[in-house]
């Protein structure tokens, strides 16, 4: 009896298999696909690098440049980078077809100019980051944004009268 | 009533030799006991509450030497009737780095103790099978990867530099078979074949010893794909990165691991998760159970040679997967959890999608199930096959649908309510015929219960925040997170560390307990029933895809793909 019903049911069902890859597949809104950094928005703060569970994002300082590197080969598409980015510079797309013939195509690099410290001359942060900070500071303190954290510490303690040098 | 039981429990534990009993968080009791008193405590507990009243969940070894202490062993015991997890903390005997084994009293502790022995070098005195479980046979003696002084990125080649060779010769898993025959004990030679072999595509296997068509004995060897996740998490990941690693423990029921981990940290740190987040977690957990059970039905039908059923089940399951994708952004690895809450909301539009899916899945699944149960050839293959008696299930620590099909009414959702399960009543499906058919019926009822629960959660979901604010995690607190995964109880134990890290993380998946019951179920069965019996516990199936057939009379061995066995049926395999 059961067999017959299954046969009837099977015949009444239309084909449910999709013809992918011959036909495109729709993915829903909010799908977590390949992430992309918008180089014009990124300030190089490194929040995404800290949050990324599989270390697909990395950050390194190369001379006068800070390099944010995204390697899709390690990415697990969790979307933590998008969530923590303060400037919405990295976003997940709907793209899921990621096969490439050259592994270099899976990497995205953003190179950002760094600022040299006004006191010691060492590069310490990206120009974009420093500008953002400077904009947020009141007039009297703005110059402090152009000093590296170590020198700033010394200056602050000096102003406050704690310097023992 | 519960309060009274709790007081009784504390005084009982004290009378059995516990030095100190405290409550680290709701639903758990931390019991400190000297190693000398440990067997007495376990024996006394078993005597007082009976073998079904206390269940060995897992055992956690901790290297506390960096904390000016010694090694510690935590036995996690589940007291389901009292709704408590007991964390029995034992310091090791320092001169020998050993504690008494409790496996002779609770066989369910067997694997967990051996795991701590392998990975931390803690000896368990009196263990009946003190052999390696996790580490390969040729791993050097005296090197324990989970100890804190072992760097996570140390390579095996670096370890061997001094000696220039492996310290142990690789042993064959079973060089000899001893089988009791009429003329006495007979020894059979065995040829090592697999688990690493070009013919085998998964490194894990069962050895089945047969005489003619009958299975005489079966052994299991696994852990060939141990990924060292605990070490990775403890050494280089932060608290909120680990949920994404936990989710990758299992390819089917990953979300339940992420939930259990987050619950453990939340419990340890005393974080109040917003109610809406708890509801969303529960909805996703039930969606996961739904697709996992439908997947299991497909696999079970396939193993029985009933491929029409397999296709039908997976067609129905596909609807669930699509909805999961729409809710979370991914079909499988949902990525929804962080410590303290969830990352995405379920709005009205998404809820409608879920309800529409539920309606279709419920109708189609019920219809198809009725058709299959009307088929004699399906029912005959599963009825009175693969018996696991209630006593054995309790003794070996079976969990989940597997235990419930053997008449044990245990379900973490009902016994230790987590997420939003405390706000609803969960009906626990129990069958007592102890065979594969019972496991099918239990899972059928659970699918329907899941559908009912999702509807109830969607109606009852309150408005509110998704994430707890000001999450602060104090160091060195212990927490237990338990969930009812589709395959059974999933336990995560976390000891928090400072600086946004965990000091110790110990996940225990349900198949860990259920796989140990397979040899018991196989004994005396026909060879043709082996695939469905193994499949009936719903192991992560692709990993247990191979059986080794040994003829007890000639000692000849052949390795078959399990699927080949299911296709060829019972025609003369041992000849």
Image (spheres, rainbow, N blue to C red):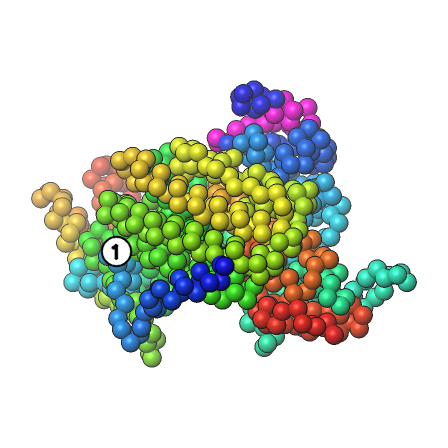
In screen coordinates, is A1 left or right of B288?
right
Q: Which residue does the image show at 40% across and 62% down from the upper left? A: A9
Tell me if I can see residue B390 in this picture.
yes
Horizontal and vertical percent position of residue B34: 68, 33
Q: Which residue does the image show at 77% across and 66% down from the upper left? A: B211
Q: Quadrant of the C terminus of chain B?
A: bottom right
Horizontal and vertical percent position of residue A116: 20, 59
| Mark 1 secondary-structure assignment | loop
Q: Which residue does the image show at 36% across and 55% down from the upper left? A: B320
Horizontal and vertical percent position of residue B245: 43, 54
Q: Quadrant of residue B500?
A: top left
Q: Say above or below: B191 vs A133.
A: below
> In terms of depth relative to the viewer, which is nearer, B423 or B166?
B423
Chain that bears disc 1: A
**Residue that carries the numbered disc 1 in the rendered image:** A30
Q: Which residue does the image show at 67% across and 46% down from the upper left? A: B389
> In terms of depth relative to the viewer, which is nearer, B311 or B199?
B311
Q: Is residue B416 magenta?
A: no
Horizontal and vertical percent position of residue A16: 34, 66
Q: How many marks?
A: 1
Tell me if I can see residue B95 in this picture.
no
- Residue, far bottom: A101
Q: Quadrant of the N terminus of chain B?
A: top right
Q: Say above or below: A105 vs B380.
A: below
Magenta-highlighted residues:
B9-26
- Graded by Cα atoms within 10 Å as few (under 14), some (14 to 19) or many (20 or more), the crowding at tag 1 reads some
In screen coordinates, is B237 left or right of A22?
right
Q: Is residue B21 magenta?
A: yes
- Residue, far left: A139
In screen coordinates, is A19 left or right of B43?
left
């Amino acid at each position: 009896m059961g067999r017959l019903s299954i046969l009837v049911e099977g015949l009444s069902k239309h084909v449910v298999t999709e013809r992918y890859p011959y036909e495109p597949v729709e993915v829903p809104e909010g799908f977590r696909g390949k992430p992309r950094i918008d180089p014009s928005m990124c300030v190089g703060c490194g929040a995404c690098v800290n949050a990324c569970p599989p270390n697909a994002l990395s950050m390194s300082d190369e001379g006068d440049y800070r390099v944010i590197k995204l390697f899709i080969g390690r990415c697990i598409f969790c979307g933590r980078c998008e969530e923590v980015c303060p400037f919405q510079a990295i976003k997940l797309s709907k793209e899921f077809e990621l096969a490439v013939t050259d592994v270099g195509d899976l990497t995205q690099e953003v190179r950002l100019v760094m600022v040299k410290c006004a006191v010691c001359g060492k590069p310490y942060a990206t120009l974009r980051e420093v500008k953002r900070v400077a904009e947020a500071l009141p007039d009297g303190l703005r110059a402090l944004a152009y000093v590296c954290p170590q020198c700033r510490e010394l200056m602050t303690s000096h102003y406050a009268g704690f310097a023992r040098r | 009533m519960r309060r009274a039981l709790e007081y009784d429990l504390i005084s009982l534990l004290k009378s059995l030799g516990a030095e100190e009993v405290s409550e680290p968080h709701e639903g758990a009791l931390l019991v400190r006991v000297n190693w000398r008193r440990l067997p007495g405590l376990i024996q006394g507990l078993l005597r007082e509450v009976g073998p079904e009243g206390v269940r060995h969940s897992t055992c956690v070894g901790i290297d506390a030497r960096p904390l000016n202490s010694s090694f510690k062993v935590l036995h996690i015991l589940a007291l389901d009737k009292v709704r408590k997890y007991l964390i029995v903390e034992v310091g090791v005997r320092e001169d020998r780095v050993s504690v008494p084994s409790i496996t002779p009293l609770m066989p369910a502790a067997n694997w967990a103790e051996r795991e701590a022995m392998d990975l931390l070098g803690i000896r368990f005195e009196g263990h009946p099978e003190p052999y390696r479980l996790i580490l390969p046979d040729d791993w050097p003696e005296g090197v324990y990867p989970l100890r804190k002084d072992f760097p996570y990125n140390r390579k095996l080649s670096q370890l061997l530099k001094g000696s220039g060779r492996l310290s142990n010769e690789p042993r064959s898993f079973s060089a000899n078979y001893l089988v009791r025959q009429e003329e006495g004990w007979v020894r059979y030679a065995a040829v090592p074949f697999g688990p690493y072999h070009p013919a085998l595509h998964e490194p894990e296997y069962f050895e089945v010893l047969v005489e003619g068509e009958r299975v005489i004995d079966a052994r299991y060897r696994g852990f060939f794909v141990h990924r060292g996740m605990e070490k990775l998490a403890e050494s280089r990941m932060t608290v909120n990165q680990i949920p994404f690693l936990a989710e990758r423990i299992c390819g089917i029921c990953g979300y339940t691991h992420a939930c259990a981990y987050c619950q453990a940290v939340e419990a340890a740190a005393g974080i109040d998760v917003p109610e809406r987040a708890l509801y969303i977690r529960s909805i996703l957990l039930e969606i996961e159970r739904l697709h996992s059970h439908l997947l299991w039905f497909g696999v079970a039908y396939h193993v029985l040679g009933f491929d029409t059923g397999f296709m039908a089940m997976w067609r129905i399951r596909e609807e669930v997967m699509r909805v999961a994708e729409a809710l979370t952004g991914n079909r499988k690895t949902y990525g929804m959890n962080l410590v303290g809450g969830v990352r995405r909301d379920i709005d009205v539009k998404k809820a409608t999608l879920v309800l529409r899916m539920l309606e279709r899945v419920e109708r189609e699944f019920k219809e198809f199930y009725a058709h299959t149960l009307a088929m004699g050839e399906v029912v005959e293959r599963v009825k009175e096959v693969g018996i696991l008696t209630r006593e054995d299930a309790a003794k070996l620590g079976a969990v989940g649908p597997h235990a419930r099909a053997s008449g044990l009414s245990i379900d973490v959702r009902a016994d230790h309510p987590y997420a939003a399960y405390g706000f609803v009543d969960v009906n626990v499906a129990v069958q007592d015929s102890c065979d594969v058919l019972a496991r099918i019926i239990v899972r059928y009822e659970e699918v329907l219960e899941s559908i009912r629960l999702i509807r109830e959660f969607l109606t009852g979901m309150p408005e509110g925040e998704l994430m707890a604010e000001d999450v602060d995690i104090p160091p060195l607190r212990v927490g237990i997170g338990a969930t009812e995964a589709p395959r059974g109880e999933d336990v995560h134990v976390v000891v928090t560390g400072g600086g946004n890290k965990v000091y110790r993380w110990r996940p225990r998946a349900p198949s860990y307990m259920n796989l140990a019951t397979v040899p018991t179920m196989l004994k005396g069965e026909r060879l043709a029933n082996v695939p469905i019996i193994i499949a009936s516990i719903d192991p992560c199936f692709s990993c247990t895809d191979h059986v080794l057939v040994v003829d007890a009379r000639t000692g000849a061995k052949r390795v078959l793909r399990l699927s080949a066995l299911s296709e060829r049926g019972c025609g003369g395999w041992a000849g």
